[in-house]
Image: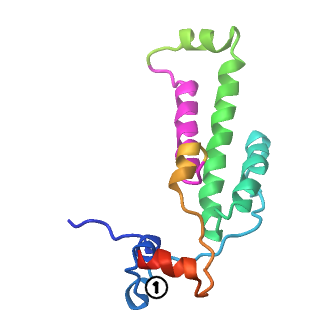
């Protein structure tokens, strides 16, 4: 198994970019400016969508193909929050709820954690933490093919 191919940006930096080999690599999806909230989201999931997704769209990180993934992420968020409310509504709070669990009884806090982890796993792909933001590459605007002295110096090494 060989090494994964270099990104097109790396070929451009190294001066090894060839239109015949590298121009059609990857997808050319256009970022969207706004993504309306799906009708299936309600309550806290809807509020969180309105808080996060517009900012992702402003950063040019969302395309049309991301809509189902984002809907699933926020659906998981809503389920996690609802399960936490079930445990918190138990007489005596979450601690009493955990203490009252029988061996074969389903733990809603564990299920809540599973859904929240699913939400976080998807959102990390959109750069939800500073570390993840440093790793993602947004859509790159095409550069003008102007010949400048600085560009020639950098390109020649």
Residue 14, image quadrant: bottom left
* Dominant secondary-structure state across the stretch colored magenta: helix
Residue 154 location in percent, x, y?
Answer: 48, 74
Residue 60, image quadrant: bottom right
Residue located at (52% from left, 46% from top): 121
Residue 13 location in percent, x, y?
Answer: 45, 72
Determine which residue is flagged by label 1: 23
Residue at disc 1, secondary structure? loop
Residue located at (20% from left, 65% from top): 1
Furthest toward the bottom, the residue is 20
Residue located at (61% from left, 63% from top): 66
Does 60 sit above or below residue 26?
above
Residue located at (40% from left, 91% from top): 20
Is 74 magenta? The answer is: no
Number of residues whose C-alpha sits closer than 10 Å to that of mark 1, classed few (under 14), some (14–19) or many (20 or more) = few
Q: Is residue 58 visible?
A: yes
The one nearer the camera, 6 or 107, is: 6
Q: Can residue 26 be seen in this view?
A: no
Residue 150 location in percent, x, y?
Answer: 56, 77
The one nearer the camera, 154 or 6, is: 154
Q: Give the range drawn in magenta.
A: 104-127
Is 116 magenta? The answer is: yes
Furthest toward the left, the residue is 1
Number of on-image labels: 1
Image quadrant holding the C terminus, namely bottom left
């Amino acid at each position: 198994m060989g090494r994964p191919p270099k990104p097109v940006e790396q070929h451009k930096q190294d001066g090894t970019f060839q239109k015949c080999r590298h121009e059609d690599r990857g997808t050319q999806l256009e970022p969207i400016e706004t993504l309306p909230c799906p009708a299936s989201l309600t309550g806290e999931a809807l509020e969180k969508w309105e808080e996060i997704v517009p900012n992702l769209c402003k950063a040019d990180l969302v395309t049309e193909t991301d809509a189902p993934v984002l809907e699933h992420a926020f659906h998981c968020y809503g389920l996690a929050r609802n399960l936490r409310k079930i445990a918190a509504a138990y007489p005596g709070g979450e601690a009493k709820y955990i203490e009252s669990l029988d061996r074969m009884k389903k733990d809603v806090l564990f299920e809540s954690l599973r859904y929240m982890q699913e939400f976080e796993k998807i959102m990390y792909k959109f750069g939800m933490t500073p570390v993840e933001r440093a790793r993602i590459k947004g859509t790159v605007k095409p550069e003008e093919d102007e010949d400048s002295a600085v560009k020639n110096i950098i390109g020649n090494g």
